Every structure is written in structure tokens, then in C-alpha cells.
Amino acid sequence: MAYSQEISRDRRGAFVFLVDQSRSMNKPFGTDVSGHEVSRAEIVADALNSTLEELVNRCMRDEGVRDYFDIAIIGYGRTNRPEFCWRGALAGRALVPISEVADHAEMVEREITVMVRGQPMVERVVTQRWIEPVAVESTPMNGALRLAQATLEEWIYKNPLSFPPVVINITDGMANDVNSEDELLATAQRLTRLKTGDGNVLLINCHIAGGDLAPVVFPWNAMELPPDRYARLLFEMSSELSDRHRAIICEIFERELDTTPSMRGMAYNADAVALVKLLDIGTRQALVFSPAMAALEAADRS
């Protein structure tokens, strides 16, 4: 059955995050608990940094972080071309083993506001950071998808039997480096035609905007979407998710698994809560072990 390969050091996985860094990401994306406006770029950077920190924690063992998968972050919008946007010692790198991601986290002390007995309280916390908020130029999404394709072609050649790579694209608008919607769809389809022996690359698209309209998250039918051409385009670009993802989504969103035959990996008009849930679900299958694999892991730790 496709999408059934357990992830291990011998059968590692891959995640590629595509991050819109266009000028519109400066727009407000809600407020924090103290009422201060927060931009889309800030929310996305915080959510992605938290996701990377969680992935590192999932790979932590007594002897350190094990290389269960490789990670790439492609930003598009800082210039008119997409680029890998690791910071510091990882700058310029493409796919990076998770142990190196852990080794090069930037430790940042910052103030956060939390609610205690209904009152906002300021606390100082230390968090890990790999990506910073950026909102500068245009939206070369097509180029980002093409760069992801080129990156994963090489990775799949080296890891032909692994669980297929997962690409998560976070954006607030339409690509402006294409001449038509069909061109963007064709690029996405070339990316998702890449495959390992366990299945095709999974592309998950998250359109963020907020506002008064309710988010549409993991639809199974295009009729669930608003009557918007761009929403339909993202639906067509997005992969049908594996049974692993479908079971997780039904549990989290309290949907009936038996009556939900399929789901697309997408969110439209997502707010901050929907974005965090999408990142969590998109990476949740990262470490799914069979009983035999779990026994080997336990033996390694003893």
C-alpha cells in the first residue's frame, strides 16, 4: 500500500517548506493577547520556527538528534527569485539533515504575553529560531515550486524507497511569475509527479488571509470552497492526502473517517490557528513506527 513506509535513519523522509515573503505579508494577521497587531510574516515565521523545534524534539534520543529526515526552507519574495533562506551557518544550504538543523538553532530570548486569571502577564522565554519574518517584493511562487522540484529530484534519487517528501507552501496571494493559472498548475503537477517507491510527492498549500470568512481546511470536494478561481486553483494544485493524514485530520477535526473518502492537502483563508494545525498535521506522520521498528529503537536506547 502506498504511503506506508516507516521513517528511520535508513529510510529517512524530507520536508520542504515554501514561504511567501512578498510585500503583502506585512499586512496585519490579527492581534496577540495584549491587543498588538501582528503581521502575516511574523505569524508564519513563529509557526514555522515552532514546527522545526517540534521536529527536532521528535528526533531527540539519548545520544542526540537522529537524522530521520532532511529539511529545506525556500523563501520567495525577498527578491524576484526564490532562494533557500536558512540563517547563519546554514545560509545557502538546500536540504539539511535534522541533526544539523538542531545544531544551528539561534537561541532567542523574548517577551511574550500570556493570560493569567484573565489578566495579561509578560514572561521572558527562550525560543529557537531558524527563519525570520520577511516581506519585501513580489510572489515568485512558480519559481519556488520549480526549485523544490529540482531539489527533490536529487533527494529521491538518493532515497528511492523512503516515504515520499512533503512540500508545504504558505502564501497569501497568487504567483506573479506566470502568464496563466494553467502554467502554475502544470508546475505543481510536475512536482507531485515525482515519486519514491512508496508514493508521489505530497504538496500541501496553505492560503492565509484571515478576515471574516471562515477558513476551509482539508476539503474533500471543491464545492466546499468559496466561489473563487484562486481557491479552485489551489485545490487542483494540492495533493490528495494519504490515509495516515486522513485519519489524523478526522480525529482532530472530529470528522467521520468512514464518510470522508478523500481529502486535499490545503487550507484557504486560513487564520493563525488553522495555519498551526496544518503545519502540525502536515508533519505529524514524520515518525510513524511499526512494532518492529519501535522494538529496534528501544533496543538502541538500552
Image: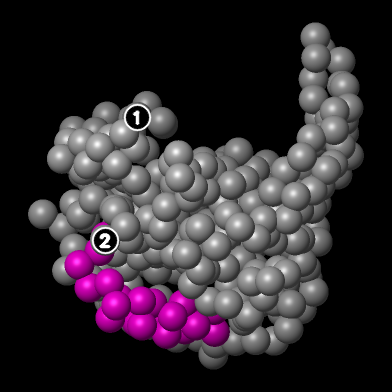
Q: Position of residue 119 (x, y in %)?
A: 86, 15
Q: Residues within 10 Å of mark 1 (few under 14, many from 20)?
A: few
Numbered disc in front, either 1 or 2: 2
User: Any magenta on residue 147?
Assistant: yes
Q: Position of residue 39 (x, y in %)?
A: 79, 53
- At horizontal 49% and vertical 72% (from top left) the residue drawn is 95
- At horizontal 61% and vertical 57% (from top left) the residue drawn is 103
Nearest to the observer: residue 94 or residue 149 = 94
User: Any magenta on residue 95?
Assistant: no
Q: Amino acid at mark 1?
A: Glu
Name the side, left or right, on which 89 lies relative to 267: right
What mark, if any, has residue 11 been given in the picture? 2
Q: Position of residue 184 (x, y in %)?
A: 46, 80
User: What SS does tag 1 mark?
Assistant: helix
What mark, if any, has residue 251 been given in the picture? 1
Q: Position of residue 194 (x, y in %)?
A: 28, 77
Residue 118 seen by the camera? yes
Q: Residues within 10 Å of mark 2 (few under 14, many from 20)?
A: some
Name the side, left or right, on which 33 lies relative to 252: right
**Residue extending farthest left:** 1
Q: Looking at the rendering, in which quadrant would you find the N terminus?
A: bottom left
User: What SS does tag 2 mark?
Assistant: loop
Write down the region rendered in magenta. Answer: 143-163
For marks 1 and 2, give the CA distance.
27 Å
Above-or-below relation of 50 to 103? above
Q: Amino acid at mark 2?
A: Arg
- At horizontal 42% and vertical 52% (from top left) the residue drawn is 66
- Sooner in the amino-acid sequence: mark 1 or mark 2: 2
**Residue extending farthest front:** 302
